[in-house]
Image (spheres, rainbow, N blue to C red):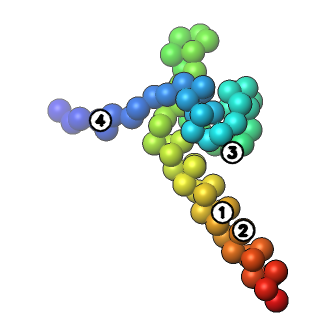
Amino acid sequence: MTLARHKTRITARRVAEIIGCLEKTVYNGGAGTHELTRVRNGRRQVRFILEEVMALVERQERQAQKARQRHSNLQVQ
């Protein structure tokens, strides 16, 4: 018997809190959430995988840092 890795499922409201946007934005796939896996629990309930959300946030932070560095380099020159 193999054990599957446990993936924590979170609500769209929690995703919105982590990313810093509105819940409706998450449901509509905005702010980069279109690439997140949507897990359906029944007809209406949608959950997202916490590990994917955290990876998305880290990727967005790295992109923002690179953009800030490029902007500051342009200001200096």
Q: Residues within 10 Å of mark 4 (few under 14, many from 20)?
A: few
**Residue with the mark numbered 4:** 4
Element class at badge 3: loop
Counting residues from the N terminus, which is met first, the one under dot 3 or under dot 1? 3
Disc 3 to disc 1, C-alpha distance:
12 Å
Counting residues from the N terminus, which is met first, the one under dot 4 or under dot 1? 4
* Vertical side of 38 occupied by 73: above or below: below
Residue at screen point 39% across, 34% down: 7
Counting residues from the N terminus, which is met first, the one under dot 2 or under dot 3? 3
Name the kind of residue labelled 2 in the image. Answer: Ala
- The quadrant of the rendering that contains the C terminus is bottom right
Name the kind of residue labelled 4 in the image. Answer: Ala
**Residue with the mark numbered 1:** 63
Residue 61, position as x, y percentages in the image: 61, 57
Q: Residues within 10 Å of mark 2 (few under 14, many from 20)?
A: few
Residue at screen point 74% across, 38% down: 30
Q: Choose mark 2 or mark 3, whichever is in front.
A: 2
Disc 3 to disc 4, C-alpha distance:
27 Å
**Residue with the mark numbered 2:** 67
Q: Is residue 71 left or right of residue 65?
A: right
Q: Residues within 10 Å of mark 3 (few under 14, many from 20)?
A: some
Counting residues from the N terminus, which is met first, the one under dot 2 or under dot 4? 4
Q: Can residue 38 be seen from the camera position used here?
A: no
